[in-house]
């Protein structure tokens, strides 16, 4: 444009060409909460809750993925029942992931989402890429549930103390109860009872 020339205000030309490959600055940084939300929850409360919920979210995403890994890689005589059970639990964990992530967002925070970020944050032990036998699969899943259950109870109590009843309700009614039930279903597979022939009853023999 020549010196002194003023730019004319032109209407943007209409084009059917999609505007591809766009990048821009973030509109909100991870670890912050937006402040103008009429939730009657002070910013420090929402900061603490969203930080703790993100930890729980990272662990729940990891457990969800551990279920799919187990669903694909399970082997042996219990293949069919475990293949189905693992997928049922996966679906239930998918629901929990969504509920926790949306709780973080509605509190004004930013939910952790992508695999590399989740991998940095989760407390759940990393499983190998290779296939493992059923008792190991079950043990890994139970260990992951244990981490989540411990933290969920602690966080539910803290949410209650801070007056965040919505978070407390989500944690107790959805996260805790679902995880407890799944623990029961998994644990029963690790009870070593005979499959075909019952052990002899000594009392009957000696009578
Ligand atoms: Fe499948």
Image (tube, grey):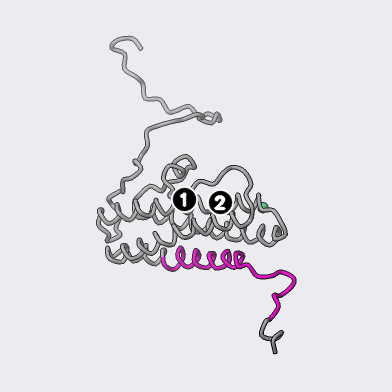
Question: What SS does tag 1 mark?
Answer: loop
Q: Residue at x 44, y 62 (%)?
A: 149
Q: Position of residue 85 (x, y in %)?
A: 63, 61
- Crowd tier of the residue under label 1, counting other residues whose Cα lies within 10 Å: few below 14, some 14–19, many 20 or above: many
- Crowd tier of the residue under label 2, counting other residues whose Cα lies within 10 Å: few below 14, some 14–19, many 20 or above: many
Q: Position of residue 161 (x, y in %)?
A: 27, 65
* Label located before the other in sequence (2 or 1): 2
Q: Nearer the viewer, residue 205 or 75?
A: 205
Asked which quadrant contains residue 206, the reply is bottom right
In this rendering, the count of numbered labels is 2
Q: Quadrant of the C terminus?
A: bottom right
Up the image or down, 107 lies above or below 180; here it is above
Question: What SS does tag 2 mark?
Answer: helix
Q: Residue at x 27, y 57 (%)?
A: 45
Dots 2, 1 in contact, CB < 8 A: yes
Q: Position of residue 199 (x, y in %)?
A: 69, 75
The answer to whether residue 31 is left or right of residue 58 is: left
Q: Where residue 144 is drawn, which disc sits there? A: none
Q: Position of residue 50 (x, y in %)?
A: 35, 53
**Which range of residues does the magenta coloring cover?**
172-201
Q: Is residue 14 magenta?
A: no
């Amino acid at each position: 444009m020549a010196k002194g020339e003023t730019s004319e205000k032109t209407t943007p030309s209409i084009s059917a060409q999609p505007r591809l490959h766009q990048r821009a600055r973030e509109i909100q940084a991870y670890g912050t909460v937006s402040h103008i939300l009429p939730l009657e929850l002070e910013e420090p409360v929402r900061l603490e809750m969203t930080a703790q919920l993100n930890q729980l979210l990272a662990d729940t995403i990891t457990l969800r993925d551990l279920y799919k890994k187990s669903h694909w890689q399970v082997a042996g005589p219990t293949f069919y029942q475990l293949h189905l059970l693992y997928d049922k639990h996966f679906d239930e964990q998918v629901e929990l992931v969504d509920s926790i992530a949306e709780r973080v967002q509605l509190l004004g925070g930013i939910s952790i989402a992508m695999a590399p970020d989740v991998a940095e944050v989760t407390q759940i032990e990393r499983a190998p890429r290779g296939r493992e036998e059923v008792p190991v699969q079950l043990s890994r899943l139970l260990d992951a549930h244990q981490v989540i259950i411990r933290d969920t109870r602690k966080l539910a109590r803290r949410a209650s103390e801070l007056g965040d009843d919505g978070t407390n309700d989500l944690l107790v009614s959805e996260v805790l109860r679902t995880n407890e039930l799944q623990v029961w279903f998994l644990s029963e597979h690790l009870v070593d009872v005979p499959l075909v022939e019952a052990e002899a009853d000594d009392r009957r023999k000696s009578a």
